[in-house]
Structure formats: C-alpha cells, structure tokens
Amino acid sequence: MSYQITIKTSGKTFSANGDETVLEAAMRQGINLPYGCKNGACGSCKGKIESGQVSHGQHQEKALTPEEAFNGCALFCCAKAESDLVIDVKEVPLNGDVTVKKIPCRVASLEQAADDVVIVKLQLPATEKFQFLAGQYIEFLLKDKRRAYSIASAPHEEGPLELHIRHMPGGSFTDFVFGKTENGTTLKEKDILRFEGPMGSFFLREDSDKPIIFIASGTGFAPIRGIIEHMRHSGITRPVKLYWGGRRPKDFYRDALCQSWAKEMPNFSYIPVASEPTPEDQWTGRTGFVHVAAMEDNPDMSAYQVYACGAPIVVESAKNDFVAKCHLPADEFYADAFTSAADLAKKNATA
C-alpha cells in the first residue's frame, strides 16, 4: 500500500509505502526533513500531522510525549503512514552535492585526547569525493550493528576525516576502540572500516545573521569544532559564544584550540563549565550545568540561534529552559543528541 504525503509549507509531495517511515520515504525521494538519531530518541524530526493517520513506532516519551501525540505531533523517523497525509514540518536546505553513500576507509591515526576520549582519523580512498556539511555525522557499518559519530572536520580541511570517540564502558564498539574487549582485540592504525554518510540536519543555517550560542557537552564538541572551523574558513563573523560542559577540566580535551579561537576570531567567546571539579583541579572557571551558565549570561535569547550537541539530558534541558525562560524561538534551536546503544536498549525495554 502506498500513500501520498504533502508538506504543508512547501506543497511538495512524495509517496510512502506502508512498511517505511515518513522520514525513510522522504529521504528515498530526495526530500530533506530534519532528523538526528533516526530511532525515536532525540526529537529532531518532530512535526505535526495536519490530516491523516500514522502509526507510531517505538520511541522515547521525552522525545514525543503522550500530550504531543494527542495534539497531532509525530516523530517522522518512527511514524508510518496509514493514509494520505498532510504534514507540517520545516524542510532542511541541503547542498545538492551532499549525497549519502557507503565508503571504505582506513584508520590513519589514533590519539588519546583524554582518559576516555580518542580522536580517530580516517583516510578515505584517493578517488572518493566525500561531500558533507560541517556538523553532520557518519555511521560505521559493523558486522551486526551501526554506530554513529559526528564529523569533527570541516568540509574544506584536506586529509583524514576526524572523529572524537568517548569510551562507553560495556559498549561493544567503544570497548574495541579503547582495547577493553574480553579477548583483547583493539582498533589499530591501518585497520579497514566502512561507513555510510553524511547524515543529519545539525549544521549551520547560513541564511541567518543572528548571533550564535553553541552548547557542547563532552564529545558534543566534535561537530561544533567542524562548524566553527567552517565559519573561520568562510569568513562568517556572526557573534559566537561557545559553552563547553564537562565534569572536570580534563574533559575540555581541546581547550587550547578553543583558546586560540577566542584570540583569533572577532566576536568569539569561549566559556568552559565544569560541573564536578575537585580540589586537585584548582579550577577557577565556571561551575555547574553548562546550559544554566548560558542562561545566566544570556537571559534574553530572543534574537539568537542555538546549536546544542551532546548528552540527551543536556540537549533536552537546554531546549526546554531556553524556550520557556529565555524567550528563544523554538525553531531557532538546532540539536544533535548523542544517544548510545545503552540508551536505545533502555528505550526498547520500556517501550
């Protein structure tokens, strides 16, 4: 069974089979809808059903509450059409050269950037032209699973593709990257991997001249690094404030780079925020929750764009509080929540 789906704002139409989600159908036909995790956890793909019926697949309640579902909202990464639909969702402008493809790669280098962070650089085939937007992500194609990681490189940067990978104890892939597997296997230089990408709608909206607040937690810094380097290269001088949250100062594993941006870029501010510094850290900077620090400095965000990346709880708290308390327009909050395999297992167990 096939259904016709119409986007209310643009009038564009596409068809969806009964066994595919609205997002899958749109992507298959070159329609760019917003999305992040693609598994009902982050809420990036949320829109409204103006007419018609959908069936909701498994998702986390924080991404789509029962009240939102009752009021006609849907997560298009898990919703399947049960009739013709009219949907209200903001389309994503993408460069026509950015196409999703499957690519082999070789591990060029591994750098231990922090106790629990490794910077992995991937060498692509010399004949492969890989186009992406700063801030997007790739998915490793492993034997029986996929694992998604944001691209920390900027599109103009030559050389290997850079990823920042945090160790999730018990995570099969990150245990492998960090040499923590039971059989002692580990990721090594020159190993061959395959990935699919680029993916995601977390990238700079360059049609705006609004000042920007970046919120990064942990390795959520990775895609933001790519975006900021892209801005430098492109001569984009919009005012920028980068808030980077970590438990302790050692979590700011690219602090020197951020400090250099603050010295070299006009209208750029860098504010690291440690939530649990210890006396031995001798930390004299900001403390507490990173999004609260941003609210303290920017009580009125009505004229801003916000780009937030990292742990789901940080992204969710930032969006809720910025919109409710700081007057940020909800459609000017762009996010990429890092949802781990453990998060997904918990989602499926409680669904």
Image (cartoon, rainbow, N blue to C red):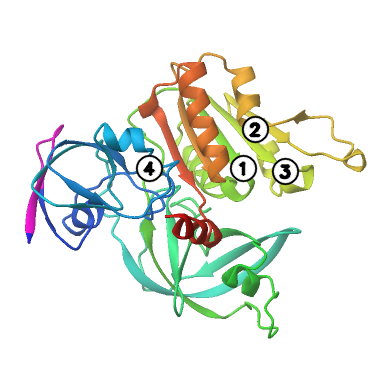
Q: Are marks 2 and 4 in contact (CB under 8 Å)?
A: no
Residue matched to label 2: 290
2 or 4: tag closer to the N-terminus: 4
Residue that numbered label 3 is attached to: 256
Residue positioned 62% across, 77% down in the render: 187
Q: Which residue is mark 4?
A: 44
Name the residue that disc number 1 marks. Answer: 217
SS of the residue under disc 2: helix
Q: Nearer the viewer, mark 3 or mark 1?
A: 1
> Is residue 68 or residue 179 the one in the foreground?
68
Front one among 285 and 311: 311
Question: Separation of disc 2 and disc 1 at Cα?
Answer: 8 Å
Mark 1 residue type: Ser
What residue sits 78% from the left and 47% below the top? Answer: 250
Query: What distance separates the C-alpha of mark 3 from that of mark 4?
Result: 31 Å
Indicate whether residue 254 is drawn in magenta: no
Amino acid on which the number 3 mark rests in the picture: Ala
- Report the mark closest to the observer, 1 or 4: 4
Is 79 drawn above or below residue 227 in the view shown? below
